[in-house]
Image (cartoon, helix red, strand yellow):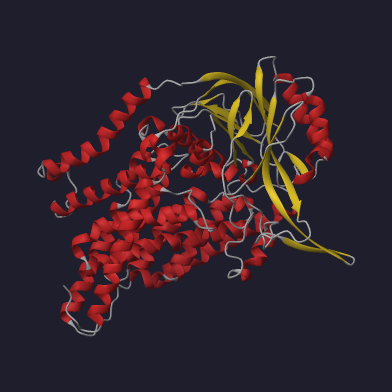
Amino acid sequence: MKNSLRLTLLTATSIATLAVGYKMYALWQQDTLWGHRPLYFFVLAWASIVLLFWKRYTRHPKGLRWLGLSTLSGVLLALSFPPFPTTILLFIAWVPLLLIEYEIAKDHAAENRQSSIVNRQSSILPYTYHAFVLWNILVTWWVGNTAFIAGIVAIWLNAWFMYVPIWFFHQTRKYLPKTGYLSLIAYWLSFEFLHLNWEISWSWLTLGNAFAQFPQAVQWYEYTGVFGGSLWVLVANVLVFKLLEKCNFQISPKAALQQGWVFWRIKLLVLVPIAVSLVWYFNQKDIGRDEEVVVVQPNFEPHYQKFNVPDEEQLKTFLRLSEAAITDKTAYLVWPETSFSAGEMNDLKSNRDIRQIMGFLDKFPQVKLVTGVSAYKVFAEGEPLTKSARKEERGSKVFYWEAYNAALQLQAGADSIPFYIKSKLVPGAEILPYHQVLFFLKPIVDQLDGSVEGHGIQPYREAFPSNSGRVAPSICYESVFGDYNGGYVRAGAEATFIMTNDGWWDDSGGHKQHLAYARLRAVETRKSIARSANTGISCFINQRGDVQQPTKYEEEAAIRQNIKFNDRITFYVHWGDLIARIAFFVTLILVTNLLVRKISNRIGKPTA
């Protein structure tokens, strides 16, 4: 590209970025939602960055080609995830990236042979990072509707995290060539596993999640969980790449067919699990006893409405929708996340809203209300403090307290109120990860109306008991984590109630993806799900992952259905993320050997 053309395009994308950004600011000033504008802003901003560093991408003779291949990978990965229906593309989405790595590795080997002083013009970093930024933008741009700065951090930081396992794979191919592509699989699965279990958790783009719109194809998740899907995808991509390598990278049906068994092995790897799953799906029946459940969707827009409408007005809406849907057979009523403030957790029964709700439930003594609430706890003098405890001074008095995003169960005549504290917290909004080290991120947390200390958590899952059964109170972000939800079942849950507030993301792909991921939880645990969202999509999900009675976005609704309760424990619930733990163990072995080999090479000692 000529420099004059590059500068013209850079000027155009920069001006367009500023124009979209200004429009977003103006809408924010008018208390108006942004819709898809964050997507346009992020795409234009990234295009400007690529054009700004164009010479870095194209200084190698193959640089422009590699940039095209990495763009292709990023787009294919994005098109493989909900709400796009093209999940099948995931089986080839990694191939362009693998080709880039292969050619750069060959380039480095040639440079090493030609000179003892290597001045490399090629690196996997810009191309891999470019692909992952595109993937993150095109699938998770809607995070910018929650909080703009958080969206920027989520996209660009997550893309950097994704680069790390690719860098390790690239190094392993160099120093331990016989384990090269095995290492890619182990490193990526380990990265996904880590991303589920540390405080900077962002597991939205776990490869196995891509099949969430088509649970018919992954009924075997009740044995493997989503890591079975991730392993499936990675192995298929490696085999496709190896097939292309055998064909000298000549892409043609004739060349592929000439490889015989290699070609058919790929087809069998992709098609056999799908065929088995389809047979499984059509023979899978919901098991257990029937319980009638009512789900309420109050439709309070969270940015400008939910926290401005008086609490008593909101509660009237909840009670009106509930009363219209409850019958004499209703066992459970489900309200969404943070439906009201429950006050001090040790004094719930004195809370005004709870007293009013209990009066309402007196008319329906058989009904158990399971609802999301906000709450807090004041620490008694001398009580051990948690890391999320906040200090507050009122005059001469100093006390400590912590905030909760929680769930509780209410029933007329019950002696106690079961209370659960959300423990998979949203980074930024509900927790500042490793805040002792990352204290400088406080301005971002403030912009999200969060706190440095974050919300309190509890170390175990629990199921709310009643005379109708035991239910899992899964709150919003928690429903994305497979083994975590398995903990509810291990605690005795016979069905899952998901309480969420997806309106933060506006009418985007975010709430559709969140719903789709819940379908995988139903398959993994073989538990029926009742899902209550503040606004769309509320629904029921059966034990094979079918969505039933989905509500529309931006509408009040109350839906009712009989769902099955059972005490079955699936293989996955019992063993959890076994595939990921094995991959993590393999990663430890590979990284140890890699470090030994690199150190040995540097000090000039031969290695075995």
The answer to whether residue 438 shows anywhere in this view is yes
Q: Indicate left or right for 14 with 444 as reference.
A: left
Does residue 18 sit above or below 346 in this rendering?
below
The answer to whether residue 2 shows anywhere in this view is no
Residue occupying the far front of the picture: 382
Count of numbered badges drawn on the protein: 0
- Viewer-nearest residue: 107 or 252: 107
- Viewer-nearest residue: 402 or 550: 402
Residue positioned 20% across, 64% down in the render? 177
Residue occupying the far top of the picture: 328
Q: Indicate left or right for 579 with 355 as reference.
A: left
Name the quadrant containing residue 297: top right
Does residue 392 sit above or below 491 in this rendering?
below
Residue 410 placed where, x, y %? 72, 31
Residue 45 placed where, x, y %? 52, 61
Residue 306 placed where, x, y %? 75, 42
Residue positioned 20% across, 77% down in the render? 111
Q: Quadrant of the N terminus?
A: bottom left
Residue positioned 77% across, 30% down in the render? 317
Residue 586 placed where, x, y %? 30, 57
Residue positioned 80% across, 37% down in the render? 349
Name the quadrant containing residue 607: bottom left
Q: Indicate left or right for 540 with 278 as reference.
A: right
Q: Quadrant of the C terminus?
A: bottom left
